[in-house]
Image: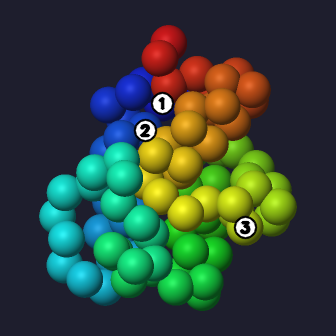
Amino acid sequence: MPDTTTTEHILRTAIATANTTGADTLLDNAHLERDLGIDSLALAELVTTLAQRLHITIPDEETGRLQTIADLRRLLARLTLDSGTDPTA
């Protein structure tokens, strides 16, 4: 089960791979496409990586709603909790 630190590390690593702008901080209000340069293809790859690394399923409809880092963090927190891999455990 990933803990908060592990989940955050996985998120940061995946974002760094998908990020085309070189931004090294993950502010909650950072827009995935506008601020980080993560287009739809990069977002699909990011979501796939996160799902694999965190052992969760991220529904396509949820992916389509992601706009900011905060959206992504909330989704991961909810899905890891729902799947029994609670990042706060």
Determine if residue 49 is in view. Answer: no
Q: Residue at x 55, y 49 (%)?
A: 71
Q: Residue at x 63, y 54 (%)?
A: 51
| CB contact under 8 Å: marks 1 and 2 | yes
- Image x and y of residue 41, in percent: 60, 87
Q: Earlier in the sequence, mark 1 or mark 2?
A: 1
Q: Which mark is residue 64?
A: 3
Look at the numbered disc 1 and give the secondary structure of its residue: loop
Using a 10 Å C-alpha cutoff, classify the residue at mark 1 as few (fewer than 14 neighbours), some (14 to 19) or many (20 or more).
some
Q: Position of residue 14 (x, y in %)?
A: 40, 63
| Amino acid at the residue labelled 1 | Pro
Label 3 is placed on what type of residue?
Answer: Gly
Q: Is residue 52 above or below residue 16?
A: above
Image location of residue 57, percent across then percent down: 76, 50
Residue 9 relative to residue 76: left or right: left
Which circle marks residue 2 in the picture?
1
Q: Secondary structure at mark 2?
A: helix
Query: Which residue bears the numbered disc 2?
Result: 7
Q: In which image quadrant can residue 84 be found?
A: top right
Spatial CA span between label 1 and label 2: 6 Å
Amino acid carrying mark 2 in the image: Thr
Residue 45, horizontal then vertical, whole percent:
58, 76
Give whichever of 84, 26 is nearer the camera: 26
Q: Is residue 38 above or below residue 16?
A: below
